[in-house]
Amino acid sequence: MTSDDLGGTGKSSNARTSPRDGKDRRPQRGRSSRPKVPVPDTSRRRKVVALASVAALALVVFAIVAGQVMLAQASYSKSEAERELERAREEYEKARLEEAQVTLPREVEQRSRGELGLADTPEKVPLALGPAQPEPQASPSPDRATPEARAEGQQP
């Protein structure tokens, strides 16, 4: 076959004309000169993207569950601390009441008599807190007597 049989002009170039419209086509390169570009495997890419999405979703779910667990533990610890605080308050009030009862004067006296051997006093004597009063003299001397006493002594 010659190029005339194919509808060509008889030129001996690699350029070929289309039998339909007669226009020249771009020269085709041979397969050996074309660089090999790997065609991406879309099914493998989809698998990797799906696996990464599942891993990210699992990480988010794990983070949420871990947060809920920590929140539950903190709530339990708080309730335990509140119960312990309430017990300590009750113990404090009880100790305060005992201390008040022990320090009453009646309780102190009973304890001192019973445990320490304090002697009973027969009666309570009030103590004078001011200066001592001089005792009156039985018979005053005539030169030291008051004018009223002198007047009484002169009357018959």
Image: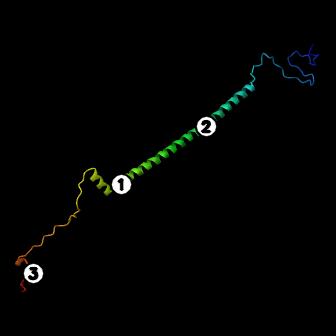
Q: Residue at x 9, y 81 (%)?
A: 149
Q: Which of the 4 image quadrants contains residue 15?
A: top right
Q: Which residue is mark 3?
A: 149
Label 2: how many Cα within 10 Å (few below 14, some 14–19, many 20+)? few
Report whether 121 appears left or right of 47. Answer: left
State which quarter of the image contains the C terminus. bottom left
Q: Which of the 4 image quadrants contains residue 2?
A: top right
The amino acid marked with disc number 2 is Val
Ranked by sequence position, the earlier of labels 1 and 3 is 1
For label 1, the SS is helix
In depth, the one of 8 and 44 nearer the eye is: 44
Ranked by sequence position, the earlier of labels 2 and 3 is 2
Residue 1 locus on image (x, y percent): 93, 13
Q: Which tag is nearer the camera, tag 2 or tag 1?
A: 1
| Cα–Cα span, label 2 and label 3 | 113 Å
In depth, the one of 116 and 135 nearer the eye is: 116
| Cα–Cα span, label 1 and label 3 | 62 Å
Q: Which residue is mark 2?
A: 65
